[in-house]
Amino acid sequence: MYEYDTLGNLVATGLDVDENGILEENSEDRITATATRFVKLGADWWEQSETRIYNLKSRSFLYLRRLFSSKGFEDSFLKLG
């Protein structure tokens, strides 16, 4: 299953385990959600991409944040729960 924002960007994919037609965070559905935005750090603008992979009912998740700049720099943060 796929979910899109109002601009047509893919924001979530997942397996609708309970087959109710929607991806629900507080269920057994397995979901990968992505958010992308631009942030200003100092004098530079960065593209920030956050990805969450989780199954909240089992209390497990993976969180990855990546920053990209037009100058080719990259920074990443990974958290397991």
Image (tube, grey):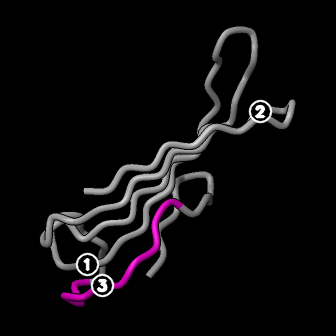
**Position of 69 compared to 18: left or right?**
right
**Position of 59 compared to 5: left or right?**
left
Q: Residue 14: x percent and y percent?
A: 40, 78
The tag earlier along the polypeptide, 3 or 1, is 3
Residue interval drawn in magenta: 11-20
Verify CB contact (< 8 Å) between mark 3 and mark 2.
Answer: no
Instruction: Check residue 50 in the rendering and tell me which mark sits there, or answer none.
Output: none
Figure check: 46 above or below 75? above
Residue positioned 48% across, 75% down in the render: 2
Residue type at mark 3?
Asp
Q: Is residue 14 magenta?
A: yes
Q: Residues within 10 Å of mark 3 (few under 14, many from 20)?
A: some
Foreground disc of the pair 1, 2: 2
The tag earlier along the polypeptide, 3 or 2, is 3
Instruction: Check residue 69 in the rendering and tell me which mark sits there, or answer none.
Output: 2
The Cα atoms of the two marked residues, 3 and 2, are separated by 35 Å
The Cα atoms of the two marked residues, 3 and 1, are separated by 5 Å
> Hey, which quadrant is residue 26 in on the image?
bottom left
Residue positioned 30% across, 72% down in the render: 23
Please give the residue where the numbered disc 3 appears in the rendered image: 16
- Which residue of the protein is positioned furthest toward the top in this rendering? 43
Residue positioned 22% across, 65% down in the render: 60
Residue type at mark 2?
Ser
Residue type at mark 1?
Asp
Please give the residue where the numbered disc 1 appears in the rendered image: 29
